[in-house]
Amino acid sequence: MSFYRTSNSSSSSTPSTMATEKDLANDIVLNNAAEDSISDIAFSPQSDFMFSVSSWDSKVRIWDVQNGVPQGRAQYEHQAPVLTTRWSFDGTKIASGGCDNVLKVFDVTTGQAQQIGQHNSAIQSLRFVSCGPTNQQCIATGSWDKTVKYWDLRSPQPITTLQMPERVYCMDSSQKLLVVGTAERHLVVIDLNNPGQIFKTSLSPLKWQTRSISCYNEGNGFAIGSIEGRCAVQYIDEQEQRKDGFSFKCHRQQVQNNGAAGGRTSTEVQVFPVNSIVFHPIHGTFATAGADGSFHFWDKNHRHRLKGFPRLNYSIPVCQFNRTGSVFAYALSYDWHQGHTGNRPDYPNVIRLHATSDEEVKAKKKTTTR
């Protein structure tokens, strides 16, 4: 099945690291993905074109793309805004949590949703994880109540509860690594071979609040983004961190200021939150998306940008690759970084699906000169 009905892409002998709006012209556009701000997107691990969307309208919707046309498959509701959604490894269940403090699981086969667990405050993030030497599948939830809990789908009581230093703002997992970012810039690393214990805690190397986290495919490190338009590449092993860890600026815009003293024109730099970071499932490169309305693809190993895309008119709260990395989904929706006053009536709730090319997401081989 083709993702696009038609393709008008062209190639160049000297590819640029900056894309244009023409490079986005073939994106499939889902104009009414939700009735309020989109909070999360998750693809099925068993299908290239099926994904769930959580939103502030208290709903989770399941969409499928057939011959380039998005189709709604199902939806279910919470009692308050939904902040996070993820699929089980076998693609049969979808979990979600949000401001009603409830963890729900939707059975894709039966179309039924049920409450599995509950926190004392909003569930900000969740992940399906494999725990211990037996690789027991469970759901890890991170909450504003300053805890991470693990849930067996067969029991309403948590398997284990871990106390966090502060409110959970973001969380991600890969292999046996679970990393939690909390308020006050705390980072908590958990080895899922021993999920009931905290492996290591530290402070973010970035100076401002942590906004996003994504773990490397290999499970040996993670990237974090902050509200100040900056990312950090981190490794669990301290020696590897000293050798390969670094941070860089992104999602910043230069603005001309004509009101400077003496009538001189000056340049100011506006910084925006890095709302979402996701790693390509095959190539290990990663994407960032921000409140400035742009997204970029990066190669952490060679420390450079693979492709930058033009700034769109609205913030991007979340982005996601599908299971093969052939599709990159990103939402154009209000991200609340300016509070409720920034939520204008004309703000869209759109999801765009972009077919990726190797030029955009595959790491370039390092060239050597004599």
Image (cartoon, helix red, strand yellow):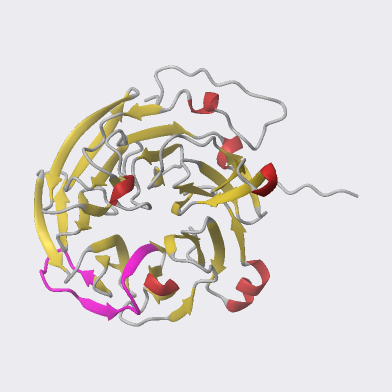
Q: Residue at x 34, y 82 (%)?
A: 197
Image coordinates of residue 98 in percent, x first then y, are: 21, 58
Residue that sits furthest to the right in the current view? 370
Name the one closer to the observer, 271 or 4.
271
| Quarter assignment of residue 132 | bottom left
Q: Is residue 70 visible?
A: yes
Q: Is residue 40 visible?
A: no
Question: Looking at the picture, does residue 137 appear above or below residue 164?
Answer: above
Question: Looking at the picture, does residue 124 appear above or below residue 7?
Answer: below
In the image, residue 153 lies in the stretch drawn in magenta: yes
Image coordinates of residue 84 in percent, x first then y, are: 27, 54
Q: Residue at x 53, y 67 (%)?
A: 206
Residue that sits furthest to the front in the current view? 262
Name the one closer to the observer, 219 or 26.
26
Image coordinates of residue 334 in percent, x first then y, are: 33, 44
Q: Residue at x 30, y 33 (%)?
A: 346
Q: Is residue 9 left or right of residue 265?
A: left
Question: Looking at the picture, does residue 36 appear above or below residue 82?
Answer: above
Name the one closer to the observer, 299 or 185.
185
Instruction: Give the extent of the magenta segment.
Output: 150-172
| Quarter assignment of residue 64 | top left
Q: Is residue 295 left or right of residue 172?
A: right
In the image, residue 16 lies in the stretch drawn in magenta: no
Image coordinates of residue 310 in percent, x first then y, are: 54, 35
Q: Is residue 333 left or right of residue 77?
A: right
Q: Is residue 333 left or right of residue 62?
A: right
Q: Give the quadrant of the N terminus.
A: top left
Q: Residue at x 49, y 41 (%)?
A: 294
Name the one closer to the observer, 97 or 334.
334
